[in-house]
């Protein structure tokens, strides 16, 4: 039964202040019983309401008794009437609208009272509890009452459509998880004390486990959901919120759980996976040592096999061979420890072992020493620590023995003969971490750009003269030049990672996995550098406001800073990529014919250049410059020529009998360029094919615009190279520069829609400058 | 009387552990009585000493009773003998050496005890208290005992010589201030709570005042020292330490004190300057408003003159016209408030007023509202707040009336007729802030590079193969490419700012001041972006270690981040620079002949290009490529051509009757390029002339190497432009790239010496990775 409007209420200020929020809320929300009690308590606490007003409002907090059509009509009429003479400027939230209509015609003194930030905050709390977002208001409220600035006119329908392409098949999961993260329980707050912060994060992770979000990556037989791709999407979505929680999640499930799953065998899986999914078993991933970070093969911790007792002795040989930066070190019960497996005095290379760190009362096991890493630049909700092991004995089963084991006679056996190959196969089982961190970088870029572009679209500063209104800063070419290329690249990387997610989940063959590894290494490097840069530029684009912690950049910047060097240092990763490309390149010919092939390729490049020289290099028509085929060809030419020339150089060094390592060092900067060029092409090619699969329409047009800018900007970033190699002449690069500015103008009116499409709820953006007036 | 070596002590472990420190300490130090008591207490607290050892060591803590030559000889012999069989690797501190010789031949269990970080820390405390730096050890200790890695071999003599060129005529002041900042009282620590942190900073600033460091910028008649240049050097030096203290110093002395000095008249000077130097009067500088940051002319706060009471009413017209980010807001007694001066309903433009904020009991004055800005990304030791004024009345004398006043009949009078000119003259009085912040950026860059290069010189990772030692990471070309160009640029900017200090102090004419303003704006922008970038790259170069707060980057990065947008947003400042250049350019011709001149210049550029085309653009000889004249010519060509072309474009727009503002927006990116090119040339030209003034020798050679890299790197950064404009061809840019790598190799062995030359004491570096083994 719905209550009708029998009472004919007087719309007094208290009611009016909440009416827009209620109107939009009732149009849209379904509330749980717990939420209702919460909202009712909030309303009871509002000291600006009269008793009558409170009673009236409470009537409409019960989902079993929703307002009927009459009431709705009354509300709508009241809002419209009272809002009639408002100056609409600056009404960008429901609470602002409510307060404006409530305080019209009230004396100055009372206005002061109504206008206190506390009053607005109280109403905002109710709006949030109702699950109402201001973006909903534009859709539901009559006559454009909220978001009335033409500049801040987001095209919500278009944004939603683009978002369906971004979220893709994972929309349901993403929406569910976002709804959970928007709950006040997960609200982002600055907790300055690390111990307190760590406890909050630990509890939140437990909640994620309780809600079933920790099980996706694992097989059903051990309590998992066997949906690896979904697990990656969860990480991507968590990264919109607190990165401490995101990283803690990654340590427990991806690193610790992933190591047990990927490097262990059935006996380990059945014993641990169920428990770690439930957070009943907390674990850490003790790989990195103080003296060995990137060079994992050089780890110095030993696990020496004792034939008599059939056990391993885990030993840290010296202080700087201790494990460092280990997440979960202060909370965990167990560690996966990477150590040199020693049998009869000989090392069989690095292997992983499960080592108890604490008993179930939380006391350290004998021989284990743990030290807090202390405060870090960010991620202070994660308990990173150092670990040392002194003569710690573990049973034989402690070896995670998928790729190598000790048989009953005490001999080492492995299905992979080469130590090096075994090592890299083991590392390969852990590629997921790089995929996750890279995509988290993309999520952070989205957050930063959402804040900077939304703020830039309402902030005004300077003007043509004192009389004219000040210019909206996003209209300045300098501001566009800062933000729009980053926006385009963020789109490109989003789709590149989503493709990588698919490849990772679909092709689990050795060949497929190796390809994913190369791409993951390169994309991780490029996307995390992109994130660091985007966050920095976005902060600066918000000026002093960006420096206040209330506007999110403080945490976003500090927390994500480590992305560029953990899970593989970016510079090291790009060298992996380049080496992979070189190997593939050489493999594609018979070794005997390599010199001949190089010669052939050399002449081909020379010939191609002369062909280009008269038409292509000087073609400055807009159609050509916006032709995706031209972009792809230019990206490809650069990558292939860098590959060919570095292969030639390496070959020359070999001929001159230069030591291979020396030759490699001489080519190191060249190799880095190659790796970057490869990833840039990968991202463009993938973006292009994603767009090809879209239906014609405005979303596709906008994605094409993003791809155009990504391509043109990247070419211009490398214009020195293109000119040096006579691939283009100066007239063409100048034409591209003009085109880029033209693209900025096309993007400008759609910029806020393009960030709205990222679909980051305002609770997760958590930046006062875009939340409030 | 000096004590002789009658006692023939047994050099037991406890004595040995401190012997190297004592030996170097006694060779060098002079201690104050207070310091001695402090050291004695430290020694009494050392629980690893026996009673006899303690007594022996205490004997040598009294400067009135120094060890005689015999004792010295004994000590030296003991150290040398015990150190004989040490593996010298990793001994990079006196405490490490002491512990190594102390623990030789002691059983494993005891070693563990000796090797605890606490023991080492205790000895380090004593070393610090003795005023001994590890760098002194290499000079004083026999036989290379400390710093024995060839890679970490800093050439201290050379570093010291270079430092004399950097510190220049200010060496005494810098050394004195550094000595003070090295005192444990100023030691850098992470204080997470802002209230606590602010109190510490306030106290430290009081100490600086007590020691006379706050008076340099002010005339002697008001208690100052009248040494403006020295004041800038103090700021530069403070920026090696805690930036919160640096900024707080800047707010009190530079902004608040500077405004009263620069905008006020005798009545203000005599009333306030003495008190603010002594910190008896704390003040803030209330210029920026929420809605008006960069566009100061648009400030909305009003100061309305009341003829009857001969007073001003200060009023904040609405919430967002409140003052924001105001440093010292929570501590200050008085504010310099910038407001529109209104007389008889008409605005006379922005003027500054002294407004009491709190009474001398710390209570807010009626009508003044203050709000804490809360936590910020960094600088949490500075109390930034928001201020609103409601009907606050101040006497007529509250107007800082150097450039405009209200006469006895209530009329506005000013020596400067044009409102705009008056406004910019007033702002000009405050240029010092930009000079300071820019140079602080240089200091931060020095700190970051000192840490990253010293760490990179001892950190090893990967190697040619498993058998060979791992490579020192600073030997990787990728690592050199990251750090060395930043090092070169830091040197260039150091000298550029020091020249600016001189110009600022020497030429106080209007013409001179305007030139300094343009340079200060541009250098501030370039140097602070450089700092942000350098700190980021340096952090990444230290990997995970760089992310730990114990290694300084946490604070360095967060605190300095605001530099790019405060005291003038960098993008806005560069536009100021470009406008200044355009104005000068136009002024240098008679207006009537402007079109003709442009035509003439156009043909001149074209002609020059064709002259270059056959010899210059293809010259790839090393002599030419390292010729400073070539560098200067290339920098100059770029700047002048950018200037000419943007002037042409603007003129074209004018001809087509495009609105000036519109035309300006269309050229905005071009103008930014011009401003950057100008500053780059300014820095190179200045660096070159500084080097010319140096005597021949190794310091000069190294500075030339730095200038070569700065020049070559900058040209390569802009190689797209040079190629596009046919100023060079591809063979030449490729040759420059090869030269750059050659320069890296020349710099490599001197890299640590080049950062040592910055002369940052290890207490101020405050990074565990370079302090400790």
Image (cartoon, coloured by chain):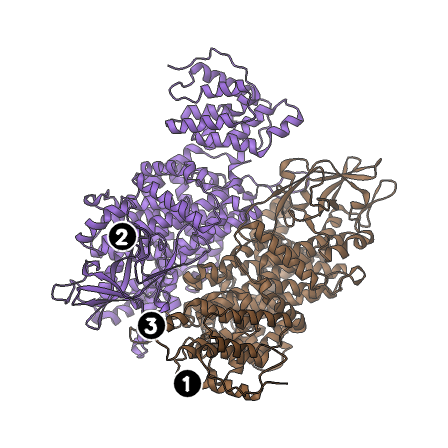
Chain colours: A purple, B brown
According to the picture, the residue beneath numbered tag 3 turns out to be: B463
Rendered position, B634 above or below A126: below
Q: Residue B218, can we see it?
A: yes
User: Callout 3: helix, strand or loop?
Assistant: loop
Q: Please tell me which residue lies in front, B420 or B751.
A: B751
Q: Looking at the picture, how far across and down is residue B527, in whole percent? A: 58, 61
Quadrant where the image shows the C terminus of chain B = bottom left
Q: Looking at the picture, how far across and down is residue A252, in whole percent? A: 31, 50
Q: Please tell me which residue lies in front, B616 or B189.
A: B189
In this view, the residue farthest toward the right is B409
Corner quadrant of residue A299 = bottom left
Rendered position, A664 above or below B598: below
According to the picture, the residue beneath numbered tag 2 turns out to be: A258
Q: Looking at the picture, how far across and down is residue A757, in whole percent? A: 41, 39
Residue density around tag 3, few if under 14, some if 14–19, many if 20 or more, within 10 Å: some
Q: How many numbered marks are there?
A: 3
Q: Are marks 1 and 3 in contact (CB under 8 Å)?
A: no
Q: Chain of mark 2?
A: A
Rendered position, A210 above or below B710: above
Quadrant where the image shows the N terminus of chain B = bottom right
Q: Please tell me which residue lies in front, A528 or A98.
A: A98
Residue B84's label in the rendered image is 1
């Amino acid at each position: 039964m719905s209550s009708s409007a029998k009472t004919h209420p007087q719309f007094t200020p208290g009611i009016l202040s909440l009416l827009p929020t209620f109107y939009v809320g009732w149009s849209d929300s379904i509330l749980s019983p717990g939420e209702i009690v919460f909202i009712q308590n909030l309303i009871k606490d509002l000291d600006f309401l009269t008793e009558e007003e409170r009673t009236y409002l409470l009537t409409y907090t019960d989902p079993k008794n929703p307002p009927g059509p009459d009431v709705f009509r009354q509300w709508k009429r009241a809002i419209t009437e009272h809002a009639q003479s408002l100056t609409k400027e600056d009404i960008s939230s429901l609470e602002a609208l409510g307060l404006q209509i409530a305080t019209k015609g009230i004396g100055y003194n009372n206005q002061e009272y109504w206008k206190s930030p506390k009053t607005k905050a109280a109403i905002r709390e109710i709006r949030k509890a109702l699950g109402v977002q201001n973006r909903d208001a534009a859709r539901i409220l009559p006559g454009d009452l909220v978001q009335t600035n033409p500049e801040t006119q987001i095209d919500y329908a278009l944004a939603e459509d683009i978002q369906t392409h971004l979220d893709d098949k994972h929309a349901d999961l993403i929406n569910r998880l976002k709804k959970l993260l928007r709950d006040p329980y997960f609200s982002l707050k600055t907790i300055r004390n690390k111990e307190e912060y760590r406890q909050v994060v630990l509890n939140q992770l437990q909640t994620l486990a309780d809600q079933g979000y920790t099980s996706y990556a694992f097989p059903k037989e051990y309590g998992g959901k066997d949906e690896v791709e979904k697990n990656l999407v969860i990480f991507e979505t968590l990264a919109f919120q607190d990165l401490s929680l995101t990283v803690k999640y990654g340590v427990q499930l991806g690193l610790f759980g992933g190591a047990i799953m990927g490097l262990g065998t059935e006996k380990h899986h059945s014993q641990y996976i169920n428990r770690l999914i439930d957070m009943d078993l907390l674990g850490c991933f003790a790989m990195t040592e103080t003296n060995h970070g990137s060079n994992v093969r050089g780890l110095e911790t030993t696990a020496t096999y004792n034939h008599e007792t059939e056990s391993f002795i885990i030993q840290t040989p010296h202080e700087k061979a201790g494990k460092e930066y280990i997440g979960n070190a202060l909370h965990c019960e167990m560690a996966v420890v990477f150590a040199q497996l020693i049998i009869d005095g000989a090392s069989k290379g690095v292997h992983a072992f499960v080592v108890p760190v604490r008993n179930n009362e939380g006391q350290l096991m004998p021989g284990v020493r743990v030290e807090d890493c202390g405060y870090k630049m960010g991620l202070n909700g994660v308990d990173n620590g150092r670990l040392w092991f002194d003569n710690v004995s573990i049973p034989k089963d402690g070896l995670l023995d998928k790729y190598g084991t000790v048989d009953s006679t005490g001999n080492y056996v492995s299905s992979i003969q080469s130590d090096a190959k075994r090592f890299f196969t083991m590392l390969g089982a852990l590629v997921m971490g790089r995929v996750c961190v890279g995509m988290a970088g993309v999520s952070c870029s989205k957050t930063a750009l959402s804040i900077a572009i939304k703020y830039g679209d309402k902030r005004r500063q300077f003007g043509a003269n004192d009389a004219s209104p000040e210019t909206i800063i996003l209209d300045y070419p300098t501001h566009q030049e800062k933000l729009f290329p980053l926006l385009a690249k963020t789109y490109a990387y989003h789709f590149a990672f989503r493709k990588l997610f698919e490849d990772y989940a679909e092709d689990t063959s050795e060949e497929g996995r190796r390809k994913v590894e190369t791409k993951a290494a390169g994309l991780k490097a490029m996307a995390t550098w992109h994130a660091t840069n985007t966050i920095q530029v976005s902060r600066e684009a918000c000026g002093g406001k960006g420096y206040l912690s209330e506007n999110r950049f403080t945490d976003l910047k500090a927390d994500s800073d480590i992305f560029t060097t953990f899970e593989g240092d970016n510079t090291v990763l790009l060298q992996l990529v380049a080496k992979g490309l070189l190997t593939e390149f050489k493999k594609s010919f018979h070794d005997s014919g390599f010199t001949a092939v190089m010669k052939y390729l050399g002449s081909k490049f020379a010939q191609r250049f002369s062909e280009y020289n008269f038409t292509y290099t000087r073609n400055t028509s807009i159609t050509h410059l916006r032709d995706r085929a031209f972009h792809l060809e230019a990206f490809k030419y650069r990558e292939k020529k860098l590959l060919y020339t570095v292969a030639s150089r390496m070959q020359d060094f070999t001929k001159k009998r230069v030591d291979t390592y020396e030759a490699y060092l001489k080519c190191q900067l060249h190799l880095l360029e190659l790796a970057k060029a490869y990833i840039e092409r990968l991202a463009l090619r993938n973006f292009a094919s994603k767009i090809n699969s879209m239906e014609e329409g405005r979303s596709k047009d906008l994605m094409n615009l993003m791809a155009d800018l990504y391509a043109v900007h990247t070419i211009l970033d490398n214009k020195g190279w293109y000119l040096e190699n006579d691939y283009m002449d100066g007239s063409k690069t100048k034409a591209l520069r003009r085109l880029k500015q033209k693209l900025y103008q096309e993007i400008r009116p759609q910029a806020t829609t393009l960030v709205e499409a990222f679909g980051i709820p305002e609770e997760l953006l958590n930046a006062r400058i875009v939340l409030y007036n």
